[in-house]
Image (tube, rainbow, N blue to C red):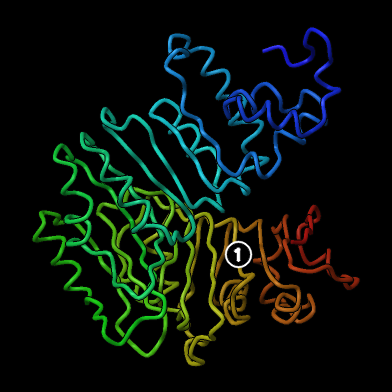
Amino acid sequence: MNILSSNDINILDLPDEMLHAIFNNLSTVDILYSLVDVDQRFTRLALDPLVIRHLDFVIKQDDLHDSSVNTKILDRICSKILPRINEKVEKLTVDQFSMERIIDVVDYSQLHSLSLEKLINLKCFSLRTNWYTSYYDEQVVPLLRRMLNLEELTLLLPVRRYKSTYIDGNHLYDQVLNYMPQLNKFIFNIHTEIIHLSTDIDVPSNDDIRNSFIKRGFQSVEACADKKSNNIICRCHVYSLPYQFDEFMFMGKCFQGGRFDKVRMLSMHDEHPFEHELFKIISQDFPFLQKLSIWNFESPKKEQHYSSTLIIFNYLFELDLMLAHSDYAIQFLSDTKTRLLCLTNLRIEYETLATVTNNFTNDATRLNCAKIKSLVMYRKFVPPHNFFSYFSSSVNVSFI
């Protein structure tokens, strides 16, 4: 494509409106690969939010003969362009040739629609996301139903449903798996969050959920569900065993334990307090955990603060307490409660950190803070004179 000139006029002389009209006749691949970083104006137009909110990566049949060119094009788009625009993408259309590269390279935080073409020959499909989708019933289920010859399915999905019930074995079989007669391998971790729970909706118990999988032929399944209460939010976790993912998202206080040797990243979220005993279980059941995020504004029970059991995390190097009650900072930063042998990255509110460390003089928190090289905080502050001496000599402070 010659984008620099035509017979009588240089394309750079055309107004933006005419260039947009030209772009409308180009594919997503052509726009991103051929126009981005050609010059500042083309880059601005090509990455306009209206252009990139729907990206269609379906590869034309005529182009399939040159796989090396396709690989080169996708390499550039995935490494140089998608990381710059992923938070603005609302809809993705991919095919079996581009699907794995495009979906796995970045997180699409605003994505609410995913379309796949040419699914009749699709044998293996994996869908993973780190944040809740509210479009499970409207878009994810219909998408999965089109994969008639699928043999392997992997789902890592936090799902938000309104005035509905938990996703259990009955739902998965009747609404999804029954449409996949060739399926022989199903790996999953599905977290359901129900909003505005109606009084006339019954939520199943842990035993009910386990039995719903067992009677469909799935023997190795764990379920962890909130009991129905007056709260407007209830949550349920179901996952296949042995656990195959490297992350475990949105663990609640109802977690029942297990063995999670593959997990490197864990996030915890609940409206009810996490107690010392749960963190002890996590340190044992997630022996190779490297990243931990806690989202809980409720203080643990006071008697739990004085447990004499020392918790040790051998590999944890990143701890996120930005959305956590200050008592969880005491739990993790005090070396009389928790020993963090590799902690280098900490996300926390400055006021919480200053309180827990007694304005950076507390010896009980000094050991766990001594190796920290990256501090991320919510707002800027004027550090006291002893602030930097409390952490690693190379500590870097940044703000969000």
Q: Judge whether 5 appears above or below 156 on screen.
A: above
Tell me if residue 300 comes above or below residue 365 in the rendering: below
**155, above or below 302, in the image:** above
Count of picture labels: 1
Left or right of 68 on screen, residue 286: left
Residue 303 x/y as whole percent: 48, 92
Q: Is residue 263 toward the left or the right of residue 70 in the image?
A: left
Label 1 crowd bin: few (<14), some (14–19), many (20+), radius 10 Å: many
Q: Which residue is mark 1?
A: 320
Q: Position of residue 165 (x, y in %)?
A: 29, 72
Instruction: Please give the name of the residue rendered at 49% of the width and 58% of the height, measured from the top-left corner.
Output: 131
Quadrant position of residue 115: top left
Judge whether 148 appears above or below 36 on screen: below
Q: Nearer the viewer, residue 282 or 88?
A: 88
Question: Residue, x 61% and y 37% (percent of image)?
Answer: 82
Residue at left 18%, top 40%?
Answer: 183
- Residue type beneath disc 1: Asp
Residue under the point 21% across and 55% down: 175
158 displayed left or right of 313? left
Residue 83 x, y percent position in the rendering: 64, 39
Q: Nearer the viewer, residue 190 or 336?
A: 190
Element class at badge 1: strand
Closest to the observer, 365 or 56: 56
Q: Quadrant of the N terminus?
A: top right
Q: Is residue 361 left or right of residue 225?
A: right
Q: Quadrant of residue 383?
A: bottom right
Percent of width and height locating residue 364: 66, 77
- Pick the residue in front: 327 or 60: 60
Q: Quadrant of the C terminus?
A: bottom right
